[in-house]
Image: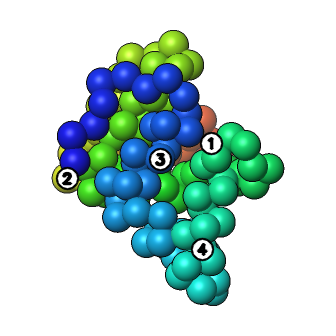
Amino acid sequence: MQSQLFYDTYEDALRDTVTALGGFKKVGNMLWPAMAVDEAGRKLSHCLNSEKRERLCPNELALIRRESRRVGVHMLATFEMRDAGYSDPVPVEPEDEQAALRREYVEAVKAMAVMTKRMERAGMLGVTP
């Protein structure tokens, strides 16, 4: 699905995101699996209708955002960032995130080793210099 470059409303960006994820029934069922598929689809449709009172809670929006990221659909995140005055989001690839976490972990372990030696020299760990 080709996404729009700009959206006028949050509901429009969210509606296109839902469509890109497979539609109201599929996403509704993802949000509320205990509910009948048709009913979940209707509930989601009502949540995206500004004329209705129903709204998605923050956790439900987060689930849609995460699923969108997983399948490479970024229109909702882009709308949110632009609306708040930020640059367009740049998705982080899971492999990049894992590599960054490994580097940070190794650096933290090294820093802890240095700190441990300093604490030993200061007599803080029961070892005298």
Residue drawn at 45 percent across, 37 percent down: 13
Q: How many marks?
A: 4
Question: Tag 2, which secondary structure?
Answer: helix
Q: Earlier in the sequence, mark 1 or mark 4?
A: 4
Q: Residues within 10 Å of mark 2 (few under 14, many from 20)?
A: few
Give yes or no for contact between labels 1 and 3 (Cβ–Cβ under 8 Å): no
Mark 2 or 4, closer to the camera: 4
> Label 4 vs label 3: CA separation?
15 Å
> Label 2 vs label 4: CA separation?
34 Å
Q: Is residue 124 above or below residue 62?
A: above
Residue drawn at 55 percent across, 33 percent down: 10
The residue singled out by tag 3 in the image is 15
Front position in the image: 49 or 66:
49
Q: Residues within 10 Å of mark 3 (few under 14, many from 20)?
A: many
Give yes or no for contact between labels 2 and 4 (Cβ–Cβ under 8 Å): no
Q: Position of residue 16 (x, y in %)?
A: 40, 45
The residue singled out by tag 2 in the image is 95
Front position in the image: 104 or 24:
24
> Label 1 vs label 4: CA separation?
63 Å
- State which quadrant residue 100 falls in: top left
Q: Earlier in the sequence, mark 1 or mark 2?
A: 2
Q: Is residue 30 above or below residue 109?
A: below
The residue singled out by tag 1 in the image is 123
- State which quadrant residue 43 falls in: bottom right
